[in-house]
Amino acid sequence: MESFRQAFELLFPPDRELLQIIGVTLRMSFFSTLISCLTGLPLGALIGSKSFRGKSFIKKLIHTLMGLPPVVAGLIVYSLFTHYGPLGKLNMLFTVRVMVVAQVMLITPVVIGLTSSFIESASKPVIETARGLGFSGFKTARLCIGEGRSSLFSVVLNAFGRSIAEVGAVSIVGGNIQWKTRVMTTAIMLETNKGKFSFALALGIILLIIAFIVNALASFIVKEVKDD
């Protein structure tokens, strides 16, 4: 109970370091989700709505990447952006930007895979109509996204959830540097290992609150879209 009391004392009023960690987490999660969805939704819709040679192999590759271990993704990005790597001159290692890169590597295959599966299973009438009208692959994909926008919103939520809950990749490429690249998940892990349960608990409470707000907002948006 003492840990809970101390955690709420950190929340009301919010601790300065706590606010900084929350800000970095939300900034990283927002941009990684945005980039992944802007890339993954159209590609997933295109793959799901079009028949082409090699589609089976591409789907297997995507499903493999959907299960890519975060530490492996972090290691790949680290090797690219380290001082001796091909992109080392960009000096992005141990910054929020390179954390976003690692997140995009992890999340984009998930968005592509979930979107293509949804399009294949739920948009067959739309695909058949588009093919009958002679629409191009990109136009068909855009039509499928428009028709299934309320259901595809769950894909965006899934992407955001994976981004905000990630530990391994962002810890490797970001370094968990205080006041710079420390996010909620890496801070929870660090503070728990140090025995500072109240700070870790405060971060855990914030994570739950953010998850609740995002899901409540998403439910409202989906309802509004369906009513339209």
Image (tube, rainbow, N blue to C red):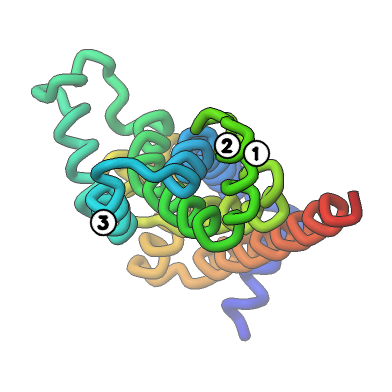
> Are the residues at dot 1 and dot 2 in contact (C-beta closer than 8 Å)?
yes
**Residue 143, label in figure:** 1
> Which quadrant would the N terminus be assigned to in this image?
bottom right
Query: Label 2: which residue?
Result: 140
Residue drawn at point x = 55 percent, y = 70 percent: 201
Q: Position of residue 219 (x, y in %)?
A: 78, 61
- Relative height, residue 15 to residue 136 (above, below): below
Q: Earlier in the sequence, mark 3 or mark 1?
A: 3
> Are the residues at dot 3 and dot 2 in contact (C-beta closer than 8 Å)?
no
**Residue 60, label in figure:** 3
The amino acid marked with disc number 3 is Lys
> Are the residues at dot 3 and dot 1 in contact (C-beta closer than 8 Å)?
no
Between 45 and 197, the one lying in front of the other is 45
- Tell me if mark 3 has few (under 14), some (14-19) or many (20+) residues whose alpha carbon lies within 10 angstroms of its own: few
Q: Residue furthest bottom?
A: 1
Q: Residue furthest left?
A: 84
Q: Classify residue 150 by image quadrant.
A: bottom right
Residue drawn at point x = 61 percent, y = 81 percent: 2
Q: Position of residue 14 (x, y in %)?
A: 70, 52
